[in-house]
Image (tube, grey):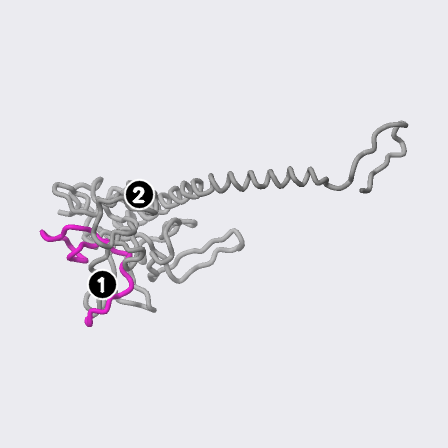
Amino acid sequence: MSQQYDADAPEGSNELGSQYVSKKDIIWIFAAIVVIAIIMAIVGPSMKKRADESNCKSYMNAIASAISQYAVMNDGFPPLYAVGENGSPALVDGKPIVWASVIPPLPRGSKFFCPASKHEEHVRVNGKSIETSMFQKDEKILSHIDLSYGMFSALSGRKVSDVANDDQTILIAETANHGALDTYNPLPFTLEDQTPVPFDGFAIGFNNSNGLPDADSKFVTRLAFPNTKDGNFDREVTDARHGKNVFAIYVDGHIGRLTPSDMRMKTNSYMWMVR
């Protein structure tokens, strides 16, 4: 192996050593890479989970603020959706017009879908959103909104004063579209011929109604809890978006967590009630 030699060095001094990386150095470098990879494999998922939770809460705070602005300007909450055939969502350019389509634009960097949600859980609706990337210089304006949050159907177009306990009643929560991941959705929107409409993740309804609850309403629908298709909300649900929970916006604007058992209507609870 070639060695460097310093002509000015005192006689008998050691050679300066190899100008190449030795086999021992390579082993140490490889070992360091392996250790870093192991640490990232252990810590990485936990870091991503915390980042997803933080971003989801941030997006929901932005949504809460936008709906609050809408409510002030229009003396009430936005309509749930534009109604079409058989009470199903009307489609414009193949996409429904829903509450997220009409509220004020979100701040740059905010989204209408949780970063922990799967693509199949999203519903694409009319409206504009912004796409950003670390690999692109300019923001891209999209002519649609990808949505993984649903609005409580009973509050569609209602006044804020119609809510008896605004710190206890849900306004927006994390939802899944059209029963994705075996989420609970026994009453999808349908056309006159009973053909299901593949867009419903924008709405939180009931087991017997996509509008107001009645005495026979027992469960709420479309919350993003996988494996609840059979209506069992008391078991442990795995791989929910945030551990065993999803996030929700209450009418007063604060963010809280929901568990699968919160899909069950409870006596003396204001969670899914209006006046």
Q: Residue at x 47, y 53 (%)?
A: 132
State the extent of the magenta-drawn residues as a range: 192-221
**Left or right for 123, reference 229:** right
Closest to the observer, 211 or 52 = 52
Q: Which residue is mark 2?
A: 244
Nearest to N terminus: mark 1 or mark 2? 1
Q: Which residue is mark 1?
A: 189
Query: Is residue 199 within the magenta segment?
Result: yes
Residue 70 seen in this snapshot: no
* Callout 2 secondary element: loop
What's the amino acid at mark 1?
A: Phe
Q: Could you say which quadrant of the image residue 89 lies in?
A: bottom left
What's the amino acid at mark 2?
A: Lys
Query: Is residue 52 within the magenta segment?
Result: no
Q: Residue at x 21, y 41 (%)?
A: 168
Residue 105 seen in this snapshot: yes
Question: In the image, is residue 20 above or below residue 137?
Answer: above
Give the spatial CA distance, label 1 vs label 2: 27 Å
* Callout 1 secondary element: loop
Q: Residue at x 40, y 45 (%)?
A: 52
Percent coordinates x, y for residue 267 in the rendering: 12, 42
Percent coordinates x, y for residue 106 in the rendering: 37, 51
